[in-house]
Image (spheres, rainbow, N blue to C red):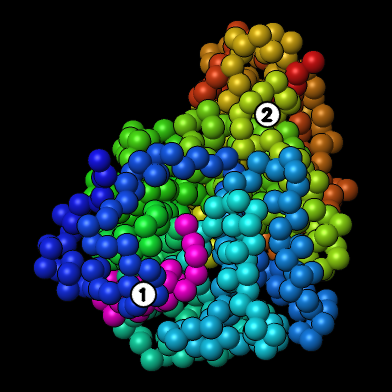
Amino acid sequence: MTSKIPLANLGLSRRQFIRTGAFAGAASIGCPSIGISQTIDHREALRKRKRRIVVQHDAYDVLQACLRKFGADQASFDTFKTAVFSHMDDPDSQIDSIWWDINGASPGSAYPSDVLPPVDNPLLKEWMKEEIDWVKELADETRRRKLEVFWNYRISEVDGLAGGGLAKEKKNPLKAKHPDWLVPDTWWWQGMWNLASEGLREHKIEVLRELVTRYDLDGIQIDYSRHTPCLPIGRQWEMREHVTEFMRMVRHLLSEVEQKRGRPFFLAAKVARNLEGCRIDGFDIQAWADKGLVDILTLGSRSIDVEVEGFRKLVGDKVQLQPCFDDHHATDGYRHQSIEFLRGVYANHWQRGADSVTTFNWSTGIPEVAEKVGAEIGPLSQQVAYREIGDPATMDGKDKIFAVERKGGYPWSDGFLNRNDTSPLPVLLPKDKTSVELPLHISDSAKSSKSANSELTLRCVLFGAKNENSFEIRMNDTILPVDVNDPNWKDAQIFSPKRQPTSGGKGQYKINPKQQLLRLDYAVPNDAWKQGLNQISIRLISAKNTSVQLEKLEAHLNYK
């Protein structure tokens, strides 16, 4: 028995459904007809679809790197292709799905289009002369590797220039023509797209219709992380039905294609890292789940503390959940970290109930390949991570670092998504000797057989602390003894008393030789910590008019 998504769940009567063309002839969308009576068991197909690692692959950056290094007339598609697939071609990779994120900030289309402005990237123009449609080639190459292929659709991208860079002076012609489609007075001078506009929603559906009928995709992700706001500022939750209506329109479109081609077409949405953030940004997750408007939620983009369990309680097993970590616009203070840190991030995601995990803005490929095309060379920890983070079993019994999240680092948003504004660190310790309470998630179990041969160290990094200061640290009400007191600790990604820089950029951090941070390490007995949420309490016992700021709080789990 099939479980086709009911029309009522899409908010459509039968008459509305037929009027919109869902039962139009196959030629209208370029897909073979499978007959009206045939249906797809969508929910069963979703239940069976298992992923380990999903890569949201920003291949436009690789394209631009090739253009800079070789020039438009010398950059071959084969060289580009080798680079973008190098992580996936590692025989030990746990990558199961590539979600191509390739329109970048270009004002033109990334593919031959009858809806969007013509392709204007010099390298894409050269490839088109050679009859290379890179979107089709990338989709085909993904399938040849037996990997799932999605398109990531950025809901409101910043406006760019054909050769790269941002359009800081020239107005996007479509925005100039349709000011009523915009949220004005946002962080981006040209304004952000406003889903409260019916005309904009219809335009976006036409863009997506062309994509899903032109290319052989398994699914589409509506990426709300690039960028918010997508509704008038301060009225996002009040006007949430406009975003829900857009999700309903996309679901209807994909259901139409699904029935005509005879196999599932999945719909994902990238949203804030917790339910509070979704409410602030106008994303009615419960309505989406109850009405069957989404299959997969990608949770957060650059955050390490993702409320998987909160989403699970709300949506049950109707929607798959996958947290994401961006290692370019990384969470503040933790860009390009060790494999131990990445294990801690992703092991926590699995322990909290993830169905799969996502990477975004990681390196182009393995270092030697990235270097050949002039792309950013990422840390070797990313290559190792692609062999481990897709399965808790391959991280079991291995060293990990668990960190409390820091706020800030992402000003390119009006709302909640990406900003981490509610994260607890850094925090000034009260001078009145009251405690600061902090949550710390640990994926591993202190009671497992492997943990019997492990050591957990709690590390505090403080700014402004003096020799005469003393502190009391508790973990789940157990007072911890200090093991290491290092008053000359350095951290290139901590800038106090200066403001923290924004995330991204080249990420070339240098140690300040004059920097003075205090590092305190505490040995944690096995009976003092537990799997899941731990409560850390820290208080400044002797202040003497000193302002002390807790910059980082980490748990280092080492297996012997």
Q: Which residue is drawn at 61% across and 77% down?
A: 133
Residue 244 counted in the magenta span = no
Name the quarter where the C terminus is drawn.
Answer: top right
Viewer-proximal residue, 472 or 232? 232
Residue 103 position, x and y percent, is 56, 73
Residue 208 counted in the magenta span = yes
Left-right relation of 405 to 21: right
Part of the protein shown in magenta: 196-218
Residue 520 position, x and y percent, is 74, 26
Q: Tell me the crowding category of disc 1: few under 14, some 14 to 19, or many 20 or more residues within 10 angstroms, Cα based.
A: some
Q: Are marks 2 and 1 in contact (CB under 8 Å)?
A: no
Name the quarter where the N terminus is drawn.
Answer: top left
Nearest to viewer (mark 2 / mark 1): 1
Q: Mark 2 points at which residue?
A: 394
Q: Which of marks 2 and 1 is nearer the N terminus?
A: 1
Tell me the tag on residue 29.
1
Q: Which residue is drawn at 88% across and 48% down?
A: 513
Magenta portion: prevailing SS class: helix
Badge 2 amino acid: Thr
